[in-house]
Image (cartoon, helix red, strand yellow):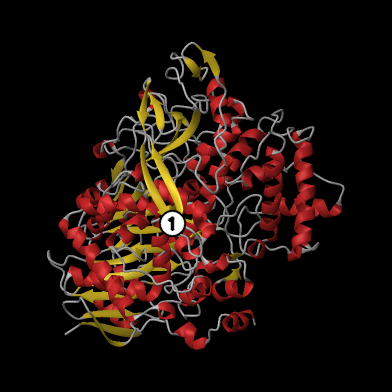
Amino acid sequence: MLVVIALVAAGLGIWTVQRSFPTTTGNITAAGLKSDVTVQRDERGIATITADSSEDLFFSQGYVHAQDRFWEMDFRRHLTSARLSELFGESQVGTDSFLRTLGWHRIAEQEYENMSAEAREYYEAYAAGVNAYMAENSGAKLSLEYAVLGLQNPGYEPEPWKPVDSIAWLKAMAWDLRTNIEDETARALQAQFLDADQLTELYPGYPFEEHPVILADDPAGRRVVAVGKLEQGATFVEEQFNKLIESLNLTPLEELLGKVDSLITSQGEGIGSNSWVVSGEHTATGKPLLANDPHLGAALPSVWTQMQLRCSTVSPECPFDVAGFSFSGLPGIVIGHNQDIAWGFTNLTTDVADLFVESVEGDRYWYDNEWHDMTTREETIKVAGGDDVELTVRETGHGPIVSGLTGEFTAIAEAPRAETPEGKILPVGPGDMGGTMPYSEAALALRWTALDAGSTPEAIFMLNRAENFTDFREAASNFDVPGQNLIYADPEGNIGYQAPGKLPIRAQGQEGYLPTPGWSSQYDWQGFIPFEEQPWSYNPKAGYIVTANNAIVNDDYAHFLSRDWDYGYRAARIVELLEEKIAAGPVSAEDMAAIHMDNQMPAAKALKQAYSSVSSDDADLQAALDLLASWDGQNAINSAPAAFANVLWENVTERLVAGHGGDIPRDDQSRFARMFALQLDTPESDWWTGGGSTSQQELLTGAAEDALAELTKLQGKNPEKWNWGKLHAITLTHGTFGESGIAPIEALFNRGPYDSSGGSGVVNATGWSLGEGYATKTVPSMRMVIDVSDWDASTWQNLTGQSGHAFHKNYTDQVDGWASGEQYAWAYTPEAIAAATKDTLTLTPAK
């Protein structure tokens, strides 16, 4: 009924809904093609494109992407060029101000100019294909969203696609995978309330002694050995520097970071990925198997599209026969395989961004004992239905000033001053914090590797046509942002790993733990780690490689990489399951797919340990505690114990941080699992009593009582009715109109809820946010298992479906399989593609 009401209210009808559905059979003339191109689609709408030349191949990829996902592409380019206000009005001015300050689109223009002529031709061909589709379609024929947008913003017409629109999306993905800006900001806020020891306890070090390091052996075979517990949090928790940080109003920055994240792929707990590769000595086929599932924000449609790009004759002039997962709006295949190699990605989790506290006065900043002029530029933000907004962007030598922006930010408060003969200075001497700092105000500048022009847009093509591990590493050397763990397998039986990326070398003692002093060069980055010194591995003795955002190396490695690794629970569990399967016999592709769906909760062991001695005279509470004691630690979809355990975990962590000042975020459940386990061994710790409890036991009992009351309210008094899958269900929300606040419009585009297993820090990483309910927010955005012995035996699965058109049969046709862990056959060879083909479209050059 809501859908019918929405259609009537919008003056729409079934014809309007369906008119944007792509033509998938017959012949279409496309101006700009040189030769005929064949587009074969299977029952899920997944396209295999076959062309005679590389230019026609990428032209057709642009055409097909536009057929399936043009609204998504148009929205993405408005996001990356900071022009959302042109679509949605003044509500997006604050977001546009922040993104215009970062200047993603400007940097993408530099990257385009720096490309090889060949790569530019590919991007130009892709843009021409998008524009060929737009030339024949407009308004609601492009997508239903344009009919809805017309109610708010009549007269809007999308402009032609440009190559830079494609390149800029990689900046958005780099932002989504940047790792620790939130942690750095949050710690700066928390340092006002917590001392150095408490901050270290809240952010404990990586458990090297318990959880795996990706490279147990370096390429030379030298054993990497953990060097003991790290002293963290002390570098910049000095009293005077904290006074300066206190003077900055960082809360609006933290809020705006979250708003920008929600527009990309909902950055949150769970952002990361799993990947692992097993050599043929352990597999049923005698050849490697490779698995990957990137964890991103739940999006509708899914951030990925599935596709194959094939040259009709593979040759040096047309070298592509590559299949896998792509981004709409971007030419090439990001993750997948070609005829010679397979590869997967997980987030490197290295620290590639720092906030610098600058001493500023107007458009000047203090650096190495003298004033320097900032670089400034004027930007105009056009606003649908409103007046233009003028913005002045200011940059120091470290990067753009991100504090004090219009809209979402309040003014920077004045920091403490001391009067001296030289004037007003920060009371910090040259011997401890880098010299005297005269200033009128303090500001934050962002130094981030993605704000330098890079070569990732070209590296994708290099990866797509790589023939061996040497080619793979060469492509990786150009994959600078976002930094990724790259795993590798080939039919010759080789497996490998490379940690590429533009990885900063920090000044001695700097760890990017808190915002960094910006007024002295002694705190600046000292360059970047040379590629030949970055971690890699080839055919390791273990016969497998596992990456799950865990520590790549430990402190024997020559360079600092991060202190904000994932805590390794997923990696440890994958290693445990792999070794069990290896010991039991050869590993199969089905075994690899089953590992994707493992649901072991990282806090399960510690939670059960904590409550092993807790009992209650209340029969209902004791029944719930008995349920917890019987739990296998798996967040299974129909599990009653998992429902109680996760609600209990919410209440335990809430009480644990209560009373410690400020709003301590609980956005990383793996970190809290580690913290909780360590604190169990120190019952006298003030984490147990800061919120008013008199002891560890009292906190645990009170949390259990609260959890029982909460779960009873949510799912009733009968434990047999408790169900984790329903409590943790996912509602797939359209990235724009799905959160319009207008229920009939939302009903047009949103789907669900769907029951969901898994949880935060789980291999089946369906993340949820402590303090914000139990619904799934972050997801394995796709899953794949590649069998290099027979490419057609590979399997894959997308979160939603291939189509971005609401009500199309392929809009959400893969969701049920995603929820249950079913993976679908992945046809690759011409024979398998022909057998799977349901629709064939021929794109023909204009005469």
Q: Is residue 816 left or right of residue 837?
A: right
Q: Residue at x 71, y 31 (%)?
A: 683
**Count of all numbered marks drawn on residues in the image:** 1
Question: Can I make out residue 531 in this image?
Answer: yes
Quadrant, the C terminus: bottom left
Q: Is residue 400 left or right of residue 455?
A: right
Q: Nearer the viewer, residue 170 or 441?
A: 441
Residue positioned most to the left: 316
User: Residue 650: x percent and y percent?
Assistant: 68, 49
User: Residue 728: x percent and y percent?
Assistant: 63, 61
Q: Nearer the viewer, residue 381 or 713?
A: 381
Q: Residue at x 48, y 10 (%)?
A: 421
Quadrant, the N terminus: bottom right
Q: Amino acid at mark 1?
A: Pro
- Quadrant of the rendered structure where residue 372 is? top left
Question: Can I make out residue 266 in this image?
Answer: no
**Picture layout, residue 760 above or below residue 664:** below
User: Residue 541: x percent and y percent?
Assistant: 32, 44
**Picture layout, residue 270 above or below residue 722:** above
Q: Nearer the viewer, residue 463 or 425?
A: 425
User: Residue 83: x percent and y percent?
Assistant: 42, 58
**Picture layout, residue 569 above or below residue 28:** above
**Residue bearing the label numbered 1:** 294
Secondary structure of the residue carrying tag 1 is: strand
